[in-house]
Image (cartoon, helix red, strand yellow):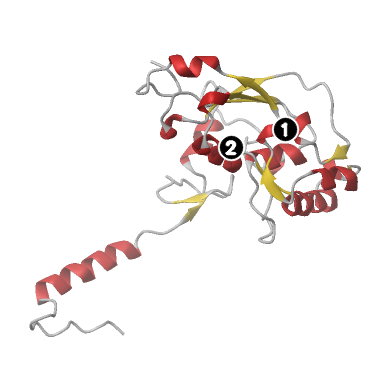
């Protein structure tokens, strides 16, 4: 049943204004979430063609325009993780590294300048995988992370708050994911979950002091209006 237009009186919408609202609502009804059948990504205006989004179509196109097989983000290429259970908590980047069996990248985080919005620039480097971990979780000091910190004389609450957010580790979240992966992921089937290593993780805390760090003496030389990428 369509709503009736309110009477045009003091404090009420006019008929013209009510018509505009109705037209706006009608247009909004045409905006729907779309799902790509290949990568399972959901979004608006994804450019679906035969159920496949624009990004997948571009990724799966060969040098001569021929489709690649198997498709990059397809189930056949083991790139569809399926439905993620709702009880699994969202992890920070460091928590993801704590539960990872192999690390293919080295993470370097740099805090530069004296303006809060320019902090936290991140660079990653590809590296050879020399080992696969069979006992988890990884400890923070074992992670391939280098933190370039400002000199101690410039350290203050701003930087500590940022590190607490970026390097937050929650023991229960780590345990929940490890148990799920061990029960459901073939690559984690033979992994040993170490109670001692779990106990070494904070219940909910910042582990930035545990990763490798280097004092960045160049922070004082950077102009305050220079961003983290440099100019």
Q: Could you give the CA–CA distance between mark 1 and mark 2, rounded to whole angstroms? A: 12 Å
In percent of width and height, residue 32 lies at 41, 59
Q: Crowdedness of circle 2 by 10 Å Cα count: few (<14), some, many (20+)?
A: some
From the viewer's perspective, is residue 163 above or below residue 203? Answer: above
In percent of width and height, residue 19 lies at 16, 72
Is 110 displayed left or right of 174 in the figure?
A: left
The residue tagged 2 is 163
Q: CB of mark 1 within 8 Å of CB of mark 2?
A: no
Which quarter of the picture shows residue 187? top right
From the viewer's perspective, is residue 141 above or below residue 171? Answer: above
Q: The residue tagged with tag 2: helix, strand or loop? A: helix
> Which residue is outermost to the front?
153
Visible in this render: residue 193? no
Q: Crowdedness of circle 1 by 10 Å Cα count: few (<14), some, many (20+)?
A: few
Viewer-nearest residue: 107 or 146: 146
Which quarter of the picture shows residue 22? bottom left
Seen at 31% across and 85% down, the residue is: 1
The residue tagged 1 is 210
Visible in this render: residue 219? yes
Is 193 displayed left or right of 208 in the figure?
A: right
Which quarter of the picture shows residue 104? top right
Q: Which mark is residue 47?
A: none
Seen at 40% across and 24% down, the residue is: 227
Going from N to C along the chain, the mark reached first, 1 or 2, is 2
Quadrant where the C terminus is found in the figure: top left
From the viewer's perspective, is residue 13 above or below residue 218? Answer: below
In percent of width and height, residue 83 lies at 67, 55
Seen at 13% across and 80% down, the residue is: 12
Q: The residue tagged with tag 1: helix, strand or loop? A: helix
In percent of width and height, residue 194 lies at 89, 45
How many tags in the picture? 2
Viewer-nearest residue: 2 or 107: 107
């Amino acid at each position: 049943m369509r709503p009736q237009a309110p009477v045009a009186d003091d404090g009420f919408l006019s008929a013209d204004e009510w018509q505009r609202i109705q037209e706006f609502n009608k247009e909004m009804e045409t905006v729907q979430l779309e799902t790509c059948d290949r990568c399972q990504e959901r979004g608006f205006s994804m450019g679906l063609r035969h159920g496949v989004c624009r990004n997948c179509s571009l990724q799966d196109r060969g040098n001569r325009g021929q489709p690649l097989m198997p498709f990059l983000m397809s189930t056949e290429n083991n790139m569809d993780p399926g439905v993620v259970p709702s009880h699994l908590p969202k992890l920070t980047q460091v928590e993801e590294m704590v539960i990872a069996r192999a690390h293919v990248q080295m993470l370097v985080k740099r805090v530069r300048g004296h303006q809060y919005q320019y902090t936290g620039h991140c660079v990653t480097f590809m590296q050879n995988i020399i080992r696969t971990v069979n006992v988890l979780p990884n400890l923070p000091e074992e992670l391939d992370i280098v933190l370039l910190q400002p000199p101690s004389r410039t350290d203050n609450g701003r930087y500590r708050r940022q590190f607490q957010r970026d390097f937050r580790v929650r023991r229960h979240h780590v345990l929940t994911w490890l148990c799920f992966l061990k029960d459901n992921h073939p690559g984690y089937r033979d992994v040993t979950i170490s109670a001692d290593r779990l106990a070494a993780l904070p219940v909910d805390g910042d582990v930035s002091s545990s990763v490798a760090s280097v004092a960045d003496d160049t922070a004082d030389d950077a102009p305050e209006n220079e961003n983290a990428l440099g100019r």
